[in-house]
Image (tube, helix red, strand yellow):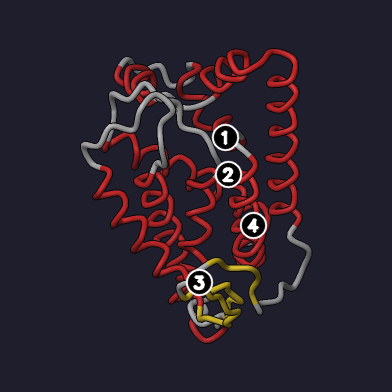
Amino acid sequence: MIPLRDANPTRRAPVVTLGLVIACCAVFAVELAILVQGGDEALAAFVENHGVVPAQLAAALAAGEWLSPPVLDVFTSMFLHAGWLHLLGNMLYLWIFGNNVEDRMGRLLFVGFYLLGGIAAVAGQLIVDPTSEIPMIGASGAISAALGAYLVLFPHARIQSLVFLGFFYQLIAVPAILVLGFWFVLQVIDGLGSLGAATGVEGGVAFFAHIGGFVMGAVLALPLRMRSPGGMG
């Protein structure tokens, strides 16, 4: 099930969401330039320097080095992506679900919310695998927070989704609670299945980052839901 768009109009232009999309695309263009100019080794070094390496982050936190590079990498890692599919998939989810969350929260609050979601995502993966030397990159953890908030704020909003039925597919308008609930259950199943599994030198999907971001987003959205329970679909 792949969401394509939602039938949930916003009241104002999603400036922050659009800015995040542009920023991620701009950073990806920098990655491509590094790859062209310096090759795979230069790009790997760039990712190593600006992605989150759990082992380094755990050591920095244990030493109380709160403004050290491993800690600051938590924020820079949110704008890095491993390839076109990684980038486009994340930007699709951010645009579909982030604009309504921004509209509901307000622009300034959404900025803080997005960053907290990214921090929660890193924390979720760090708790599970604090000794990993593989860099974590991508906006998916912070975007997962937007998914969690969307589920709480707009559970009945209709999401136009591409649903695969064997070799066939169909466009169906599905309630957000089903689309995002299904997505979250998959993250939990895959996350539990990945425990103890070797991911190799190139790493894999940080499922517990998705879970951590999603849970944080849902929890932070609860007060907004309770303030106006009748105003949200």
Cα gap from disc 2 to disc 4, whole angstroms: 10 Å
Mark 2 or 4, nearer chain start: 2
Count residues near mark 2 (Cα–Cα under 10 Å), then give few for <14, some for 14-19, many for 20+.
Answer: some
Res. 226 in view? no
- Please report the residue visible at 55 percent of the width from the left and 66 percent of the height from the top: 2
Q: Front-most of 206 and 39? A: 39
- What amino acid type should be assigned to the residue bearing mark 2? His
Q: Nearer the viewer, mark 2 or mark 4?
A: 2
Element class at badge 4: helix
Amino acid type at circle 1 is Ala
Mark 4 against mark 1, which lies toward the viewer? 1
| Residue 82 circle label | 1
Q: Are marks 2 and 1 in contact (CB under 8 Å)?
A: yes
Q: Please, what secondary structure does the residue beneath circle 1 have?
A: loop
12 to 159, vertically: above or below:
above
Relative to 133, say whether 208 is above or below: below
Q: Position of residue 40 (x, y in %)?
A: 60, 18
Q: Which residue is mark 3?
A: 167
Q: CA distance from mark 3 to mark 1?
A: 29 Å
Going from N to C along the chain, the mark reached first, 4 or 1, is 1
Mark 4 to mark 1 CA distance (whole Å): 16 Å
Foreground tag (3 vs 4) = 3
Q: Position of residue 19 (x, y in %)?
A: 74, 47
- Residue, disc 4: 92
Residue 86's tag is 2
Residue 178 at x, y = what percent? 43, 76
